[in-house]
Image (cartoon, helix red, strand yellow):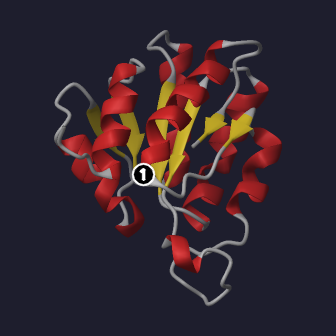
């Protein structure tokens, strides 16, 4: 069985959960994810001009009946910029999935001033998410995506962040 990259595993997992549109703002911490999405023709990636737009568009998509809205952005300030739309979706019970990049695994928590480093970005967003998880190993991606969709589809529909 051929091995998949983390980006391929993410794209395939999102597709299997029904994602057909992702609103995102590309950046260096998303290159591998975008490579995986490029190989998944069933998912359309719509590029925005600001991180806030990714989550507002995902929210509008979900409210308009498109299914669970999906947004993607770089970590740290990118995720924090997206937090206005995340908070709006959370308060309105609009189901959106937020996929944020991350700095290199070995540098998380090092407080060295790495591009887009925020300690701890999960803590900054947790108050406006129903469920959140940091993935440190690509092998965890399929289970984490499936668990996120479980939370998005059960109980009060609110934002989940992977």
Say what secondary structure mark 1 lies in.
helix
The tally of labels here is: 1
**Occupied quadrant, residue 30:** bottom left
**Occupied quadrant, residue 40:** top left
Measuring from the top left, give residue 59's x and y in whole percent: 56, 28
Left or right, residue 121 beside residue 36:
right
Asked whether residue 44 appears in the rendered view, the answer is: yes
Measuring from the top left, give residue 146's x and y in whole percent: 52, 26
Q: Residue at x 26, y 42 (%)?
A: 37
Q: Looking at this view, name the residue that lies furthest to the right.
A: 127
Q: Looking at this view, name the residue that lies furthest to the bottom.
A: 112
Q: Nearer the viewer, residue 22 or 63?
A: 22
Residue position for label 1: 138
Q: Nearer the viewer, residue 23 or 136?
A: 136
Left or right, residue 30 beside residue 79:
left
Which quadrant is the N terminus positioned in? top left
Q: Residue at x 32, y 23 (%)?
A: 20
Q: Residue at x 48, y 40 (%)?
A: 71
Measuring from the top left, give residue 159's x and y in whole percent: 66, 31
Q: Residues within 10 Å of mark 1 (few under 14, many from 20)?
A: some
Measuring from the top left, give residue 86's x and y in whole percent: 66, 40
Q: Nearer the viewer, residue 73 or 1?
A: 1
Q: Residue at x 66, y 84 (%)?
A: 110
Residue 143 higher or lower than 157, as above or below: below
């Amino acid at each position: 069985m051929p091995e998949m990259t983390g980006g391929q595993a993410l794209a395939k997992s999102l597709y299997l959960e029904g994602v057909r549109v992702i609103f995102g703002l590309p950046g260096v911490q998303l290159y591998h994810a975008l490579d995986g999405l490029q190989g998944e023709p069933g998912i359309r990636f719509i590029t925005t001009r600001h991180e806030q737009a990714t989550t507002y568009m995902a929210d509008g998509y979900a409210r308009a009946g498109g299914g669970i809205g999906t947004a993607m952005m770089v970590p740290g300030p990118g995720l924090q910029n997206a937090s206005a739309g995340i908070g709006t979706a959370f308060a309105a019970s609009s189901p959106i999935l937020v996929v944020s990049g991350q700095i290199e695994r070995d540098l998380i928590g090092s407080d060295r001033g790495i591009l887009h480093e925020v300690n701890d970005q999960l803590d900054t967003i947790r108050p406006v998410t129903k469920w959140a998880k940091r993935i440190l190993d690509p092998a965890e991606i399929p289970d984490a995506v499936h668990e996120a969709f479980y939370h998005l589809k059960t109980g009060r529909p609110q934002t989940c962040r992977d």
